[in-house]
Image (cartoon, helix red, strand yellow):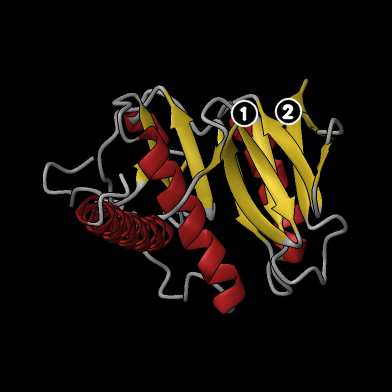
Amino acid sequence: MSAYAFPLAEIVYPESDGLPMAESDFQREYLMYAVEALRLHFQPRNDIYVSGNLFIYYEEGNPKAVIAPDTFVVIGAPNHDRSSYKLWKEPKGPDFALEITSKSTRGEDQGAKRGIYAFLGVREYWQYDPTGDYLDPQLQGFQLIEGNYWPLCAARPIPGGFSLHSAVLDLDLRLENGQFHFYDPRAQQLLLNHRETEQARQEANRARQEAERVAAREVALRQAAEARLAELEARLRGLGEI
């Protein structure tokens, strides 16, 4: 080879494909919820990375070997922001993947993506259909066993739906009246995103303020009653009746 040969061009791994992250508001709302709720839940852990709609490159030198889960969790990776997730630069691949499925992604979610996730060793693969048009039931979970995904069948009934447990996250995934939420069985509470957390905080503040107003009214009424009783007793004493 000539000493003047040009070096190989640097391989570029794009950070975006320029497409919207979701087909509609139905998918976008739950995509954002899942990432935010899991990030808030695992925030104290420095060894758990949560992201979504982020390119995962799984073959060095091949930018076409890429997948972008709607939500994924890596247990055993540093918790810091990234522009993309390159497997050869990370300690390991994802353990959990969730797709918010839609009309345009249904085929890929149940076909190509499922196969790639199995190839990458993603231990749990979940799908949720917000509109209820494509999956029955709307929420489905699968566990990887000997290279293939098998349904999680141990659903627990809850009012208006059912709950499935994720052994990877140690959380429940709940479907209640068609709505999906993560649930912490240890704390016995739903996982909320930033907007829901703020709404809950405001509602708690309003309830506290109302309780304080009720308590203040009760104190005022009691004090008025005590003052009236004292006045009556004073009059009776003046009449010599007590």
Q: Is residue 86 visible?
A: no
Gap between marks 2 and 1, in whole Å? Answer: 7 Å
Q: Which mark is residue 234?
A: none
Give percent across and percent down for residue 126. Answer: 68, 45
At label 1, which amino acid type do we have?
Answer: Gly
Residue 144's quadrant in the figure?
A: top right
Between 203 and 156, the residue placed more toward the observer is 203
Residue identifier under label 2: 144
Between 91 and 194, the residue placed more toward the observer is 194
At label 2, which amino acid type do we have?
Answer: Leu
**Mark 2 or 1: the one toward you:** 2
Describe the element under mark 2 as helix, strand or loop. strand
Describe the element under mark 1 as helix, strand or loop. loop
Give percent across and percent down for residue 15. Answer: 33, 59
Q: Count neighbours of disc 2 (C-alpha within 10 A) and say few if under 14, some if 14 to 19, many if 20 or more.
A: some
Give percent across and percent down for residue 218. Answer: 35, 57
Give percent across and percent down for residue 28. Answer: 52, 70
Q: Residue at x 59, y 69 (%)?
A: 27
Q: Residue at x 32, y 35 (%)?
A: 43
Answer with left or right where residue 102 lies relative to residue 43.
Answer: right
Between 201 and 109, the residue placed more toward the observer is 201
Residue identifier under label 1: 121
| Quadrant showing the C terminus | top left
| Quadrant showing the N terminus | top left
Q: Residue at x 51, y 52 (%)?
A: 34
Residue 42's quadrant in the figure?
A: top left
Q: Are marks 2 and 1 in contact (CB under 8 Å)?
A: yes
Q: Residue at x 24, y 51 (%)?
A: 10
Answer with left or right where residue 146 lies relative to residue 119.
Answer: right
Answer with left or right where residue 180 lies relative to residue 38.
Answer: right
